[in-house]
Amino acid sequence: NAGVTQTPKFRILKIGQSMTLQCTQDMNHNYMYWYRQDPGMGLKLIYYSVGAGITDKGEVPNGYNVSRSTTEDFPLRLELAAPSQTSVYFCASTLAGNQETQYFGPGTRLLVL
Amino acid sequence: GQSLEQPSEVTAVEGAIVQINCTYQTSGFYGLSWYQQHDGGAPTFLSYNALDGLEETGRFSSFLSRSDSYGYLLLQELQMKDSASYFCAVEGYGQNFVFGPGTRLSVLP
């Protein structure tokens, strides 16, 4: 199993550009999460999904969108990039009933200039 | 809302024991998790407490007191590779998962 994979590893965006951060897991997990982590800080939940077709907002959803058309994929969309979205983005997944044990991808480092 | 507090930094020497505390305020609570993150890496799960008491996993132990809204992670026989950031995280109602600000542990030779 590859676990949780994320692409790209690193990206530079200009203000106002858009992009999609990809996240895929091959563990048949139904729960998936997107977090952002600013330097020296903890992780903040952006969006989460408890299954295909079901998504919900976390603590910091503004400026982001998600979709969950399959169990494996949970892409995160930035429509109008802003410098405040410069961060490291982590995707995670877990099984229902086991939410405390999340498996994280390697992260995407995003710089918005 | 939910908020968690942890010390920002802790320093200890190889072979020692260190305790990282976490206090939380939450409107709903299922349990307290601990994650480890090395610089440039992804968080990895260490331990979880849903009930009061001590959970032991090898050199790492985690404690929870629900009445005090308090928990700690205990690391024994410290090794250089334990130098990392440690995060407590509260699982609240509605799938909400909130991480603390993290404690940076430096292990000195």
Image: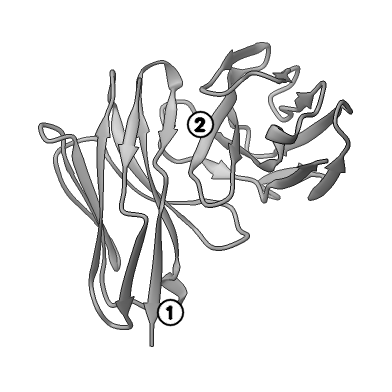
Residue pictured at 18% horizontal, 34% vertical: B69
Residue A32 in the image: state x and y as whole percent: 60, 29
Q: Nearer the viewer, residue A98 or A106?
A: A106
Q: Which of A106 and B8 is in front in this view?
A: B8
Residue reaching furthest left? B67
In the image, taking residue B14 as reference, residue B104 lies left or right, namely right
As displayed, is residue A57 above or below residue B7?
A: above
**Amino acid type, callout 1:** Met
Residue A74, located in which quarter of the rendered image?
Answer: top right
**Helix, strand, or loop for circle 2?**
loop
Residue pictured at 63% horizontal, 32% vertical: A28
Q: Is residue A30 visible?
A: no
Residue A95, labelled with which disc? Answer: 2
Q: Nearer the viewer, residue B37 or A41?
A: A41
Q: How crowded is mark 2: few (under 14 residues within 10 Å), some or many (20 or more)?
A: some
Q: To which chain does the residue with label 1 belong?
A: B
As displayed, is residue B56 above or below residue A60?
A: below
As displayed, is residue A79 above or below residue B13?
A: above
Measure the alpha-carbon separation of dots 1 and 2.
32 Å
Query: Which mark is nearer the camera, 1 or 2?
Result: 1
Q: Name the residue under label 1.
A: B80
